[in-house]
Structures are given as structure tokens and as C-alpha cells.
Amino acid sequence: MQETKKDVVLETVVSMLDTGVFEN
């Protein structure tokens, strides 16, 4: 499967959410 740029961005956002980067 080819990953589009949007897929890569979504994976990055999900991984940041998983690590709690957006927690305030």
C-alpha cells in the first residue's frame, strides 16, 4: 500500500497524541 502525505501526517498526529504532546 502506498502512503499518501495525508496518511503520514495523520500517523504523526496520532503518535503525538499517544505521547501526550498536546496535553495542557
Image (cartoon, rainbow, N blue to C red):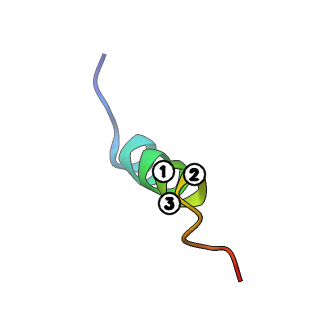
In the rendering, at what x and y percent does residue 23 appear? 68, 74
- Tags 2 and 3 in contact by the CB under 8 Å rule? yes
The residue closer to the viewer here, 8 or 16, is 16
Residues at circles 2 and 1 in contact by the CB criterion of under 8 Å: yes
Residue placed under numbered mark 2 in the picture: 18
Marks 3/1 in contact by CB < 8 Å: the verdict is yes
Residue at 54% from the left image edge and 71% from the top image edge: 21
Q: Is residue 24 above or below residue 20?
A: below
Of the 4 image quadrants, the one containing the C terminus is: bottom right
Q: CA distance from mark 3 to mark 1?
A: 4 Å
Residue 8, given in percent of the width and then of the height, sits at 37, 46
Callout 2: SS: helix
Q: CA distance from mark 2 to mark 3?
A: 5 Å
From this viewpoint, which residue is outermost toward the top? 1
Query: Given the image, on which type of amino acid does mark 3 rest?
Result: Met
| Horizontal relation, residue 3 to residue 18: left or right | left
Q: Residue furthest bottom?
A: 24
Residue 15 got which mark? 1
Q: Secondary structure at mark 1?
A: helix
- Residue type, numbered disc 1: Ser
In terms of depth relative to the viewer, which is nearer, 21 or 1? Answer: 21
